[in-house]
Image: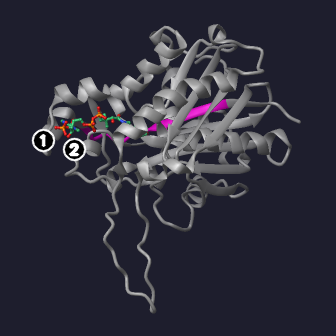
Amino acid sequence: MFDIEITGTGRYVPENKVTNHDLAALVDTSDEWITQMTGIKERRISLGEDTTEMAVQASLKAIEDAGLRPEEIDLIILATVTPTYYFPSAACLVQTRLGAGQATSFDISAGCTGFIYALNIAAQFIKCGTYKTALVVGAEVLSKITDWSDRKTCVLFADGAGAAVLQRGKAGIIASFTGADGRGADYLYCHGVPFGNQLVPVKDTQPHYTVMNGREVFKFAVNIMPESILKVLEGSGFTLNDIKYFIPHQANIRIIDSAAKKLKVDRDRFYVNIDKYGNTSSASIPIALDEMSRKGQLLPGDLIVVTGFGAGLTYGAHLIKWTKANY
Ligand code: UT7
């Protein structure tokens, strides 16, 4: 069994900012409602760059940050619900763009928990010795599956990508935990290609947009986020007090506030950047990690917990000891 550490991070968001005021010109909403109900002030919306392109940009930064060459990557796992194609995987497209020709490459779909799941899978491969160096990416262009006339969803979702390099090395990833409850699949979904063939005519009545029962997802999230944090700490020998930062999926400031309150943890120990980026699904946690790392907020020896929830419904967390030297 080998130890695993995060040795590099990177992020990429489109330049184009869309403010709450911009959205108020599009649907019946207001800056006040969006800010109070979600904590979002603005988000980045792509003007043409697709998931693969953004994933490549974030990955290049992460690989450079790790001090590696792309040829040294032997595994790429890309988490997304908005791949450029159904197939080939976005990971294969990223692999060739990076010149990481040695890397086994595949996508995974776990909604907004995608990065948490992907990190877990990559960690298992490294732990058991199959691979040494993995690139884990969360990349989304949610704007292309958003119904821009639906005020309940269009104010939330956004575009972006984040990446992390995992290597055999120090004991950085201390504990991991993932789970799913498919009974909640109807609460957050986007239909695929409708059924139909030469025998059965296509009956396309479903929109190819994100459909969400916000209330139900909210109820699920406020319970599962604190539960996931406690679960990943269980048996680790560490307690909530040992954790410097909690880095939650950025879906709604009220979910984060509620988790902090339930755990009786000072809210300042929960990292928040939802005001700037909105909900970027599987990209939100690696974007936050990279932002914190480059700002010097993460120091060698710091203990952090990353935690997510999302469509599926899925959830999970990792307890990580930061081992990367400061910038
Ligand atoms: O990554 C995981 C993805 N999703 C989530 O984490 C989402 C979790 N859920 C939420 O964050 C919240 O459910 C929302 C912020 C999406 C909505 O808050 P809510 O308290 O659950 O509101 P609601 O959907 O029950 O709607 C309350 C009212 C409704 O008006 P009426 O029917 O009471 O007159 C909505 O039509 O708020 C209205 N509303 C809006 N008003 C202004 C919904 N969206 C908007 C909007 N602007 N953008």
The image shows residue 161 at horizontal and vertical percentages of: 47, 42
**Residue 151, numbered label:** 2
- Residue 307 x %, y %: 56, 30
Q: For the point 53% across and 24% down, which residue is it?
A: 247
The residue sitting at 79% across, 24% down in the picture is: 171
Q: Is residue 114 left or right of residue 174?
A: left
| Residue type, label 2 | Arg
Q: Secondary structure at mark 1?
A: loop
Which range is magenta? 7-17
**In this rendering, does residue 277 appear at all?**
yes
Q: Label 2 CB, ligand 1: below 8 Å?
A: yes
Q: Residue at x 52, y 9 (%)?
A: 264
Q: Earlier in the sequence, mark 1 or mark 2?
A: 1
Residue ranking furthest to the right? 1
Q: Nearer the viewer, residue 278 or 207?
A: 207
Circle 1: residue type: Asp
| Badge 1 residue CB within 8 Å of ligand 1 | yes
Instruction: Tell me the distance, in whole angstroms, between the alpha carbons under discs 1 and 2.
Output: 7 Å
Badge 1 density bin: few <14, some 14–19, many ≥20, Cα 10 Å: few
Structure colour scheme: one colour
Q: Nearer the viewer, residue 212 or 105?
A: 212
